[in-house]
Amino acid sequence: MKRNVLTFALACLCAASTSGMGGKEQPPANPRIKLATTTSTENSGLLGHILPIFEAKTGYKVDVVAVGTGAALKLGENGDADVVLVHARAQEDAFVAAGHGVDRRDVMYNDFIVLGPASDPAVIGAVKSSTEAFSKIAAAGAIFVSRGDKSGTHVKELDIWKAAGIAPSGAWYKEAGQGMEQVILMANGMPGYTLADRGTWLAVKDKTTLKICYEGDKGLFNPYGIIAVNPAKWPTANYEGAKALIAWITSKEGLAAVEGFKLNGEQLFFTYK
Amino acid sequence: MSSEALFSVRDLSFSYGSRKVLQVPGLDIRTGEVLALVGPNGSGKTTLLKILNDLLRADSGSVLFKGRPSAGNPRLRSGSVYVHQSPFPLAGTVHRNIAFGLRARRLPDSEIRLRTREALERLGLAGFGRRDAKRLSGGETQRVALARALVLDPEVLLLDEPTAQADRASAERIREVLADIAARGRTTIVFSSHDAAFAEALADRAAYLEDGRLVRIDPGRRGRAPKAEDTARGNPE
Amino acid sequence: MNPFLGSLELIFSGDREVFQVAATTLRFSFWSTAFSTIPGLILGIALSGHRFPGRRTVAAVVSSLTALPTVVIGLAVYSFISRSGPLGHLGWLFAPAGVILGQTLLALPIVVSLVYTGLSKLDARFAETLITLGAGRFRRLTATLFEAKYVLASAVLNAFGRVTGEVGVSMMLGGNIRWYTRTMTTTIALDTSKGEFERALSLGILLLGISLTVNALVHAAVKHEQ
């Protein structure tokens, strides 16, 4: 009996908290879409900029849950999200291959950069590739702060170490297990090097004395993909909503909104022409 | 005064853990009588009173109330009230305390008001109705507790050292009220005291307890003149 | 900037998000406290009112449950209300319902434990007085509630404070979704992770202010009843 009262009270609560949404010509049957994405994507502010446009147009409400890449995909796998937006191509493909997701589309890209102390103790300023930069850091035993959390950034970092033929370990290699901003601030404090996505860097750089020591490598390319959770596996997932979001974000209007998003005057995400 | 046994106690025994605190081979309490339990602290008086009110259950032996076992007996519960040696005032006003039992019986408000006022007057507590029950003197608290019990007009009153906390004036008032109740003959009173003279002056019989054992029962002196020695000592007090 | 001034600025800036986040915090705290108070009071009173073998063990277990880390509670509830869990069909994960459920479970042992210990301190004579005056079970319950109202008020306030200040449950079960399940504490956590320490501190002071105000109001109300 208590459960029914609980459910009823919470239903009223939820109704009260969700009322007042703009009723369009025909509000969608299930207006809430759960989007699982990464903390760096959310913290860049992109979604806060583009999603209101989508919401105003369609009457959907997008609930953004920002966690690590691995967690975001896990949410999709467990049916706790309706759609995922991440930047880890290999894992995205595995996700779809395993039948957890459908309708994968490319959305946008940005890049990773190697940050380091202004003095650049490992002298990577003149290297020609990211693998070379990492090799010099390891050789110098310079402090390197890793995300250590299986995020997209972390996966990219490990790929570079692998390509350089190095298994990073030792006192100089710090595995933080934290978000991107935290890791940048840690690198700032130690001081040391780290691999970061440009978006977070732009948001946080005024709080640090680090500089971009290396950038531009094709290996530092960071593409984003959006995938709907497989409705065959999770019939309760809001597939209609997921489709609507995917359709919009890859439409001319959506892509323009993405390109139009600027952080400190700089464009952060680029779309495929 | 009827001579039927209201309470009938046989082979009663009660222990706290391994320590035996009460042993009563036999005791009958007659309807309408005033029985005193006399003995020093720790002699088992409180234990016996609580057992008679079914606040404690004996380990062995039998306690009969009107011929039926006392344990869980609804007529015993509704027909008797126990008053602690150091009574606990309920949170709230004196009025709330006194009306509490009446409200539990779901009596109409008008009757509650009437009976409460009567009880207050009887115990010399007129005007105390709105006072905070937790902020009274020892004697006032004891009188409130007695009023709280009397207002229910119980068949049986079980009083643990009814004047122990009281100043002289309160004690005197309490003694008067008890003597008055006893005289009317409708209520059976069992009270405990460490003061033999006080007990005998008020009671029909006095049961003496030593180390939890009932050692003897003497006739009391209720309604009769006090002994010569008592007057010389300036009792009762 | 002085964080105290910062928190004043947050309040008076009319920043919609600050208000929304504060309102959400209060809403979640209110419901979880309410849902834990009634069963908590009843269980606490029942526990103190009945002697049974193993009672001390039960009391000790309940007391240690109050020390459960919020992330553990969050994790346990998460496994139940995730779509892939037994209660997944309710759809409570990443929604207010999930947070309130988790916070209620967080608050419940606190209420039970504090009520139990508070009532145990109540004189044995109190219960005996109620019984001898003829109070039935229900009346004994209400009389106990009235007699111990300071104990009960402080138990409820304690629970309220706990759920208002926690992050683990809100974060795991609510998902920190903007405008929806984002609370003051999860916002502070987020701001801190982004390096916005000043804003986090200001928000923290605001949270403290709200908490103290609620405490003061309840204390005044209970006293006034006298």
Image (cartoon, rainbow, N blue to C red):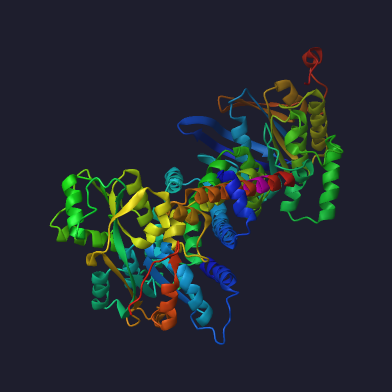
The residue lying toward the viewer, choosing from A124 and C223, is A124
Q: In this rendering, is residue C212 above or below A89?
A: above
Left or right, residue B54 beside residue A221: right
Q: Does the magenta-highlighted stretch encompass residue C218?
A: yes
Q: Where is residue B95 in the image (x, y as percent from the top left)?
A: 79, 44
Q: In which quarter of the image is residue C223?
A: top right
Q: Where is residue B36 in the image (x, y as percent from the top left)?
A: 69, 30
The residue lying toward the viewer, choosing from B210 and C149, is C149
The residue lying toward the viewer, choosing from C165 and A114, is A114
Q: What stretch is highlighted in magenta?
A: C215-219
Q: Does the magenta-highlighted stretch encompass residue C205?
A: no
Q: In which quarter of the image is residue B2?
A: top right
The residue lying toward the viewer, choosing from C208 and A113, is A113
Q: In this rendering, is residue A197 above or below A52?
A: above
Instruction: Indicate the quadrant containing the N terminus of chain B: top left, top right, bottom left or bottom right.
Output: top right
Q: Which residue is drawn at 76% across and 29% down?
A: B137
Instruction: Indicate the quadrant containing the C terminus of chain B: top left, top right, bottom left or bottom right.
Output: top right
